[in-house]
Structures are given as structure tokens and as C-alpha cells.
Image: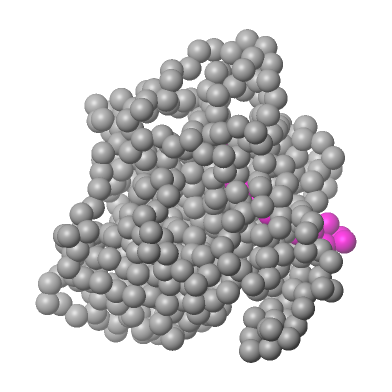
Amino acid sequence: MTGLSRRAFLAVTGAGAAAITLAGCNTASTSAVSEPERFDAALPIPPLAESELVDGIRVLRITAQAGTHQFRAGEDVSTWGFDGPYGGPTVRATVGERVAVEVTNELDESTSAHWHGMHLPPDMDGGPHQMIEPGDTWRAEWLLDQAPCTLWYHPHPHGATERHVYRGLAGLFYLDPAPGSAEAAVEEQLPHTYGVDDVPVVIGDKSFSDGGELVIDDGGNEVGLLGDVVTVNGVVGPVLQVSTERVRLRLLNASTARTYSLGLPGRTVTLVATDGGLLRQPVELEQVRLSPGERAEVVLAMEPGEEVMLHSFEPELGNVVVPFAVGANDAFDVLRIVAEGELSASPEVPGELATFGLDAASATVRREFRLSDREINGAEMDMARIDETVEVGTTEIWTVINDDLSPHNFHVHDVQFEVLSVGGSEPPPELGGRKDTVYLEPGRAVELIMTFEDYADPQWPYMYHCHLLRHEDEGLMGQFVVVEPGESADPSMIAGHGLH
Ligand SMILES: [Cu+2]
């Protein structure tokens, strides 16, 4: 067990901490994740969602449903998924297109579908104010107006997001570059054949009961549920066969609490993109740290006949007070990758990938967000309260501080931000791209810069929150509206709406 109950955690991190030793915690130096004996389950590739063009709009339909899924062959588990028992199809559309997604809820409780990382109007965001009741269909329609990137979609019902995502409701959403764009030329040079050399890797840790069902309430660990079984695209012990000299992995941490640090032991991977799109230049890394909700695109070079293991090293989580209780001591294999005897040629990764950048001198507003326990700036989430009001067109710098001795992270809806500093220093190169979610080390501040370009609407808020989903569910979330200059937030629509 990785278990250290929240009450015990608060006790050791509280005033009496100095008097308490952790000598009794004999799991402190060993990984709490149990690896499968063999990695021989063919990595499933999520199907691409079907779509049709209707009056120039790319229309997709997905359905949230309950079902039965086998993470391990022969073992049926009750799960939830979009268009299937677990996970969801990969949605693919092109920057510049209008998309409409019609989401039907066939579950027996209300849910929602949030487009994580998407720049879109607040009433299309699929947050806790856009609930879909059982039997209903909700239509979200918007213009894909941001850099090409790898996003994802998942439910966002207030107080229940951890459970809905953990049971399996999560899928990828690829924004492909517009034809003729600079990004399209780069994309040609990167591995880009879906499921062949451009491979979705959705990682989720699970915990199973003696009866083989998913354990959801694990007694209240500080960070939420840390499963002792790691799954990729819904299976345990996966293997990926590759037939090309280079393979691109689109990594998504769809876990509710666990942070991974992914790499190939003894060699580097080439990081080309993070949450919001391509980096300026590729970065060679030994490990890519991914906290819940973050994405990374890495390119691996393979030799014919070679076999490598994608591994999760002990993640560097900062100055956490009880490392084993937050997964900091866990290291384990994730995905075996086997190259065929003959590999087709792949282009080299371009040295220049993308051009972008927000100028700190253009920021006219600064805000500070202090995360402590389940409060941001001293307040728990209130669905009927607008916490921040932003004028459309403004570039702002948000300073986000983890005031606790345990991990948090921070996700902002509607925008992709850039990281200006981490703990007062220039961010490492892997944080040099556009992001929507960032890890927060205990006791340190990150400065984020972002521009709120569109979609002024005083009535419908966007969210910002910790993406450790139990923290979010328990109140570590706030709401902002984007308004026209001089306009005020109008919470009249949301007061009493969406509350159950
Ligand atoms: Cu948190």
C-alpha cells in the first residue's frame, strides 16, 4: 500500500512534524507500483472518431457509456468510456475548422465533456456549468483557433471529476496544422502516421479490489488515488511494434494524481511539443516529468531489431515532506517498444520547430494565486462566485504559489500560457513551450503569462484549478470571466445553475 491517510498526512506535516519520525514507514525506499511479469499485450490504438462535414462544420458524435473492459486478458472490470467501455476515440480536426461535438450521456448520472487546453467560448468549455443529464445530448460548437497541438477531453462535473476520469472517460483531441502553414511543413518532417509512427500513449494508474473491480475511494491519500497498476491505452503490460526509424509518442498523463517521469534508461528522448504545441527547438531529455493532465510529444530513434523500455523514473516532485505518500519513490516500466528487423526511413527532426512568444513587457495585469490545502487565496470553489474578472485582449502574468508541503499543479481553461519563471529562475527548456497545465513544487512560485484574446462573456466562467482531481473535487478550483473593457462579471445566470 502507498497509503498514508489524509489525516495522518496532515498530522506529520503539521506543527508536530519535527517530533514525528517516519521510521515506521518501511515502504519509503521502494516503489509501490507492481510491474506486470510480461509486457506482451499489443498496445491498443484508440480509433479515430468519425466525423462528417455539415454546412462547413466538422460534426462529431460521442457517447459516454458504462461497460466492461479487460485491462488484463480474461479479467472483466466495470468501466466507463466514450463510444466504448473505456477511454475514448481520438478526435482529429484541423486548425481553422469549425467543429461541433454532440455528446450524449448514456450513464445513469450527469457528466460533462471538457475540451482540455482548447481556446473556445466559455459556454462550450464543458466545465461544471455545462452538465449533461442522463439521456441528454449536449452540442458544443467552436472554431479551432490556436496552434496545432495534442489536447484531450474528459468530464468536469464539480465534485466528481476524479471518479469520472478514473473510470475511463478520457480521449485525445488532435489539432492538426492548417494546410500550407509553417507548422504543416514541420509536421511533414515529424512522424505523423497515426498508430504507426505517431502513437497515442494515454497513461493511467489503477487500483483493483480483491473482486477485480476498480477501487476509487482508497481511504483518502493526500494527493488522491495512487494506483499500484499502470495502464497504457487501457491495458497492463503493453508492447508497441515499430516499423520506422523514428517514432513519435504523444504522451498524456490521464491519471488523477500520479506524476510520471518518463524516459528510456541510458539514453535520451527528443521532446518536440508540450501541452499547447511545438517547442521552438527540440530538447534532448533523459526524463520528461508529466503531472496529471499534461502532455508531451517525444520522438525516439530506433535501430533495427532493437528493444527499449519506456520507464517512469522516481519523479522529482520538489521538497515534499512525505515522498512515498505522493508517489515520489515509485519507479516502474510503462511500455515495451520493439523495432522490426527492417525499418523504413524517417526524416531527421528539424532543428527549428515553431515561432511564438509573449512579451512580459506587454502584460498589464498581475494576479497571484496561493494554493493551500483545498483553497485558492483562502477560498474553496463556489459555483456561484466569480473569483476573477479579465478584460478581453489583455495580457496578464499570473503568479501561482504552492503553499503546501505536497504536490499540486495548475490548469487554466481557455488559454495556453508560457512559463516565465519557476522559483524565481528561468524555466528549464522543457517548460519553454506553450502549456495549459504546470506542476507546482511545494513552496515555490511559477509565473505564467497569457493573453485572453476572445470570447468576452460576463455570464459564463472558465475554471482554473489543481489537476490532481481529488484536490479539484474537494475545492481547489476558482472561476474567471472574460469581459469587454469596463464590463463587470454577471453571476446571475450561474447562481443556482448546475448545482445539485
Ligand atoms: Cu492539488
Residue 223 spot, x, y in % from top left: 63, 69
Q: Tell me where the magenta segment starts and ends, as one range.
A: 200-213
Q: Quadrant of residue 411?
A: bottom left
Percent position of residue 387, x then y: 33, 80
Residue 133, given in percent of the width and then of the height, sits at 51, 68
Outermost residue toward the top in this view: 342
Q: 12 above or below 259?
A: below
Q: Nearer the viewer, residue 345 or 17?
A: 17
Q: Which quadrant holds residue 17?
A: bottom right
Q: Residue at x 58, y 67 (%)?
A: 319
Left or right, 189 with respect to 214, comes to left
Q: Position of residue 255 (x, y in %)?
A: 61, 56
Q: Quadrant of residue 148?
A: top left
Q: In this image, 305 relative to 190: left or right?
A: right
Kindly identify the residue that appears in the image at 65 percent across and 81 percent down. 13
Question: At x 69% / y 16%, what residue is drawn?
Answer: 305
Q: Nearer the viewer, residue 4 or 285?
A: 285
Inspect this view and state whether residue 443 appears.
yes
Residue at point 44% right, 85% down?
A: 379
Residue at the left extreme, as displayed: 486
Observer-nearest of 441 and 147: 441
Direction from residue 462 to residue 245 in the image, left or right: right
In the image, farthest residue toward the right: 210
Is residue 202 located in the magenta-colored stretch of the structure?
yes
Q: Quadrant of the N terminus?
A: bottom right
Q: Is residue 214 above or below residue 368?
A: above
- Is residue 228 a member of the stretch shown in magenta? no
- Is 301 drawn above or below residue 260 in the view shown? above
